[in-house]
Amino acid sequence: MESEEIGQGIDRLILAPAARRDAILQLMRSAKRELVLSMFRCDDFTIVDELATAVKRGVRVRVLITQRARGWKEKLKDLTALLRSLGADVRPYDNTVMKYHAKYIVADDGPALVTSLNFTRKCFESTCDFLIFSENPEVVSGLKALFESDCTTPLASLPSIPDRLIIGPEHSRRRLSEMLSSAQSSIRVMDHRVTDPQILALLAEKQRQGISVRILGDGPMGGLICHGRMLLIDQKTAIIGSIHLSPPSLDSRREVAIIIEEASIVAELYDYFESLAMDEVNRMNLWAMPALPPEGEDDEEDE
């Protein structure tokens, strides 16, 4: 993938690993009043340093962070303490029912970032991931409202959310199922955890109807580790974010994804998918129904 970004409209796509860190740093540097971050993992100190710099220039930095990430119990405590010591307002997600797995940033009144990556050296260097920066006022306001709700009243009903955002677990299963069901010609899925029986049955049914269904997620992805999640429907609509097509992700996690219909971005994502699909080792067998993890097992070890 030679291009680093695409899209001259209201949204901007970043694919290349080499462009990810700088794009996020530029977003953080653009904040003049407030910077909000939804965080699952972070071990990249350029991000931490940039947050400290934002605080020093008078920006209110607010971080909503998970309390559950496998292998990160102590790291999350240390990260929370570090960010607080730098002057950030850090709120651990206080909902014992749902795991927090959303990944987004908003600077002031925009732009906003919705992504599948973590703020880690691994995701900045060696994963297949997706970043969408959006100036759309509804996307920006929707993410800010979600952030406020999850910070202050995490057990309450969702605030009003624009249609371009898919919020899990409240909306994810229904909306993704509806969008997959609406496919008229093709479905493309990049997700290394396609394990939900209902979704698998739906994909199989669409294939029987003559819809071209292809899933990537098993292989090396052009030398990158498969980590990002993406759906492409009829070469017209893309969905990018933190949502896996797995029961835990669809039913019991705070997740965020964004719908993209900007033609240049959808075309770029489709071409990228097809270039990876040329290598058969990357393809997943739709008919090999994967075994579900034992009940209660956390399947997000590296997410």
Image: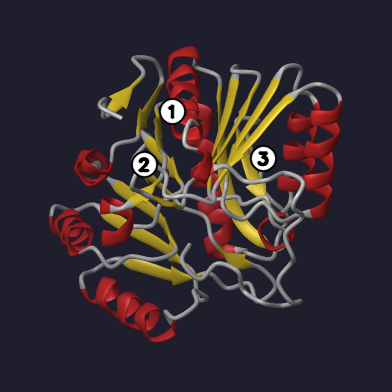
Mark in front: 1 vs 3: 1
The reply to whether discs 1 and 2 touch (Cβ–Cβ < 8 Å) is yes
The reply to whether discs 2 and 3 touch (Cβ–Cβ < 8 Å) is no
Residue 120 visible in the shown view:
no
Residue 168 visible in the shown view:
yes
Q: In the rendered image of this protein, does residue 17 appear above or below residue 72?
A: above
Q: In the rendered image of this protein, does residue 14 appear above or below residue 91?
A: above
Colouring scheme, one of rainbow, by chain, secondary structure, one colour: secondary structure
Horizontal and vertical percent position of residue 149: 58, 56
**In the orientation shown, which residue stands out farthest toward the front?**
280
**Side of 16 relative to 285 (left or right):** left
Q: Amino acid at mark 1?
A: Ser
How many C-alpha atoms fall within 10 Å of the one at disc 2: few (<14), some, or many (≥20)?
A: some
Q: Amino acid at mark 2?
A: Gly
**Side of 216 relative to 52 (left or right):** right
Which numbered disc covers residue 160? 3
Q: Amino acid at mark 3?
A: Ser
Q: Residue at x 40, y 40 (%)?
A: 113
Q: Earlier in the sequence, mark 1 or mark 3?
A: 3
Q: In the rendered image of this protein, does residue 242 appear above or below residue 63?
A: above
The reply to whether discs 1 and 3 touch (Cβ–Cβ < 8 Å) is no
Mark in front: 2 vs 3: 2
> Mark 2 highlights which residue?
222
How many C-alpha atoms fall within 10 Å of the one at disc 3: few (<14), some, or many (≥20)?
A: few
How many C-alpha atoms fall within 10 Å of the one at disc 1: few (<14), some, or many (≥20)?
A: few
Q: Earlier in the sequence, mark 1 or mark 2?
A: 2
Horizontal and vertical percent position of residue 252: 71, 63
Observer-nearest of 245 and 209? 209
Quadrant in which residue 211 is drawn: top right
**In the orientation shown, which residue stands out farthest toward the bottom?**
74
> Mark 1 highlights which residue?
275
